[in-house]
Image (cartoon, rainbow, N blue to C red):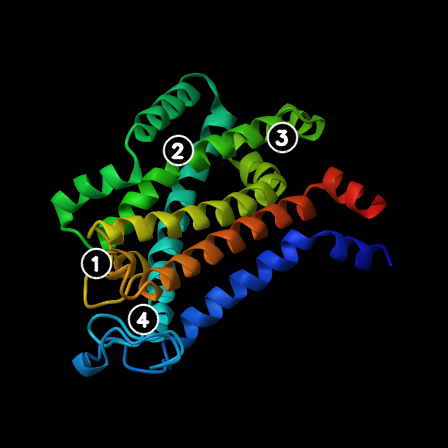
Amino acid sequence: MKRILRLRWNTALIVGGILTSLLIVTALTSLVWTPEVPTRVRIAMRLKAPLEAGLLGTDHFGRDVTSLLMVGAWNSLSIAWPAVLLGAAIGIAIGCAAAAWKGIADEIAMRASDVIFAFPAVLSAIMIGALVGSGPLAAVLAIAVFNIPVFARVTRGVALQVWTLDYIAAARAIGKHPLKITLEDVLPNIAGALIVQVTIQLALAILTEAGLSYLGLGVRPPNPSWGRMLSDAQTYLTQAPHLAIAPGVAIALSVLGLNLLGDGLRDALDPTLRGRGAEA
């Protein structure tokens, strides 16, 4: 009974899980099926309203908006996921090292994080684009670089708390190597906080990818992208507002779902918050 009450109480986890699942299912479905070929140009069908031609109408090239949204979901995730995972892998390693060895290693890691924080993802994408060319690779690298200091700081903060626990002191007293302590004792205890951070950063990565594509630094046309759809819709806001509403709602729901999922996971994985929910 307590588990059922706990599940009902954690509304954020349920709603966030549903919205995130819809995003993933839509993205995966687009790999095998879409209502129309997303890149099919039909000038005679341009700027049709929703339900007049397809579920969400057509754009200024006569392309089906529903199909563009579905493929855009995959393109967003295919950039956001690798970027966040790459940034998390490097940031977690740096944060764990800073917490384990402290001293000069900690100081160098944190100062390097401050330097990276000074360069927003958009500015990083411009600089990386100058080196490797604009496109998905530049977007992945820019978002990953931005995520490194985030995960480094979060990891360092929670890891330092674990390093003060008695069983860690006992492990150090018997001569256990700091690397072994980190892998066997510290990481398992901070995994929950890192999982929550991944979901939050994934939401930000999707938003950043849309912004980069809006500026022409992300997915290249004719590949669909939610940010590119918003950019193209500017010219037709009064004539065909659905062109901006559809990708805007898709981005908002995706970010909302992942943020709710992160909040729900935080509540579910935090013993103190979980206890409050059971009592409520």
- Amino acid at pointer 3: Val
The answer to which of marks 2 and 4 sits earlier in the sequence is 4
Query: Disc 1 vs disc 4: Cβ atoms closer than 8 Å?
Result: no
Q: Which mark is residue 149?
A: 2
Q: Nearer the viewer, mark 1 or mark 4?
A: 1
SS of the residue under disc 2: helix
Query: Disc 2 vs disc 3: Cβ atoms closer than 8 Å?
Result: no
Position above or below: 46 against 86: below
Residue 107 position in % (x across, y down)? 40, 19
| Distance from the alpha carbon under mark 1 to that under mark 3 | 54 Å
| Distance from the alpha carbon under mark 2 to that under mark 4 | 34 Å
The answer to which of marks 1 and 3 sits earlier in the sequence is 3
Query: Disc 2 vs disc 4: Cβ atoms closer than 8 Å?
Result: no
Can you identify the residue that label 1 sits on?
A: 235
- Amino acid at pointer 1: Thr
| Distance from the alpha carbon under mark 2 to that under mark 3 | 20 Å
**Crowding at mark 2 (Cα within 10 Å: few <14, some 14-19, many 20+):** many
Q: Pick whichever, 53 or 228, lies toward us.
A: 53
Q: Residue furthest top?
A: 103
Can you identify the residue that label 4 sits on?
A: 68
Position above or below: 48 against 276: below
Can you identify the residue that label 3 sits on?
A: 162
- Amino acid at pointer 2: Pro
Residue 202 position in % (x across, y down)? 44, 50
The answer to which of marks 1 and 2 sits earlier in the sequence is 2
Residue 216 position in % (x across, y down)? 19, 52
- Amino acid at pointer 4: Leu
The answer to which of marks 1 and 4 sits earlier in the sequence is 4
Residue 234 located left or right of residue 188: left
